[in-house]
Image (cartoon, helix red, strand yellow):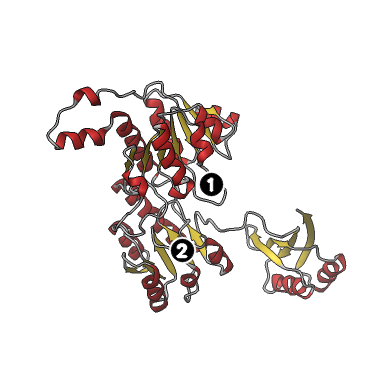
Amino acid sequence: MRVLIADQFEQSGRDGLAAIGCEVIYEPKLKDRQLFESMQKLQPDVLVVRSAKVNEDMLSTGPLKLVVRAGAGYNTIDVTAASRRGIFVSNCPGKNSIAVAELTFALILALDRRIVDNVVTLRSGKWNKAEFSKARGLHGRRLGLIGTGQIAQEVIVRAKAFGMPIAAWSRSLNVQKAREMGISYVSSPLKLAACSDIVSVHVALAPETRGLINDAFFDALHPGAYFINTSRGEVVEQSALEKAIREKGIRAGLDVYAGEPASGTGEFESSIAREPGLYGTHHIGASTEQAQEAIAAETVRIIQTFKESGEVPNAVNLAQRTPATCVLAVRHYDRPGVLATVLSAISEARINAQEMENIIFEGAEAAVARIHLESEPAAEMLQGLLKANKDILEFNVIHL
């Protein structure tokens, strides 16, 4: 199996892929047209990326079967195009959660103690204890979380250690789940903004989250509140945040931005980066040695599982529900040609099979096949199959 790695990737991961018999091609600076041309030339079975964008043209090059995002978010991959071509897309959720949570708190503490301004002033040869002694402190300050996934859960652990009450909103959260997590449930982002001293965003970028944090959200936020985003830049309407910084004294800690450079280095001309109320880092949330080693190990596990079984851990583009309306359960003797006979009859009836599994009983004498079908087969057809093939023991139709 040929694996093309088109971004920075740990040596331990490359060694791990080689150890399971993969041909590993490591070209960590491939982007855009260069990546497309390399995929045409190299014809990989598996593509591993971090920040590189994967478009439909790239996905159409040869035998590609699997794209692994060596990280959590996969918005840089055309998942819809991959699904049309039957290409698996997988990611490594949770492996960088602690690293991002650590940076989240680094930004909160830096804002509260004005760490950056302290350092800049000190390096310029000035001493200003009078100015920089005006921190609020975190104990007792309410932290509001947008999203309650694995990163947010790690933030919760750390916030509790700082003695901060925590409230949260997410589409999947309810009162009972919040109680189990030891936090308060808030029914909307606007209500969360209104009751929080600090808000931290931890949601994936999706159509329903793009621009989720907007003018209305910042209007609801207290003047002088802290706002943290380590998720995706496009979740926040940047112009609304800039306005809130200038007009409401909101202090922001950002690790992500709309339109940030795709490469590790480059020019970054953004008006928000020049705001005095912003402390910004360079999309480094997941960039700790611990996180990258964990992601490399998970990437190897995904590819090894696929190579050895055809299954893909963490696949993000499998249908949650197919068009199937029923399941045809076929109890049969484990003999050659039994299922071929059944599937041939289904095909002649112009019924599409969506999913199928065949479970063998101990001793390998009998089995049960479950075939998910778009429509129910005629009873006459099933009776005819039972009479014609003595290795078919029984049919059951289960409606979904």
Identify the residue shown where x is 56% and y is 63%. Answer: 80
- Mark whose residue sits in front, 2 or 1: 1
Q: Residue at x 31, y 67 (%)?
A: 26
Going by the numbered disc 2, the residue's amino acid type is Val
On the image, the x and y values in percent for residue 151 come to 43, 40
Label 2 and label 1: CA atoms lie apart by 24 Å
Q: Secondary structure at mark 2?
A: strand
Instruction: Tell me if 49 is positioned left or right of 333 in this view.
Output: left
Residue type at tag 1: Thr
Residue 237: horizontal and vertical position, in percent? 48, 46
Q: Position of residue 328 (x, y in %)?
A: 75, 61
Q: Can residue 161 be seen in the rendering of this structure? A: yes
Depth check: give the residue in front, 384 or 2: 2
N-term mark: 2 or 1: 2
The image quadrant of residue 365 is bottom right
Where residue 67 is drawn, which disc sits there?
Answer: 2
Q: Is residue 217 above or below residue 71?
A: above
> On the image, numbered disc 1 is attached to which residue?
209
Is residue 285 visible in this depiction of the protein?
no
Residue lying at the far top in this picture: please name it. Answer: 140
Extreme residue toward the right, this view: 380
- Rendered image quadrant of residue 153: top left
> Where the N terminus falls, by quadrant?
bottom left
363 up-or-down from 123: above or below: below
**Label 1: how many residues lie within 10 Å, few (<14), some (14-19) or many (20+)?**
some
Name the image quarter holding residue 176: top right
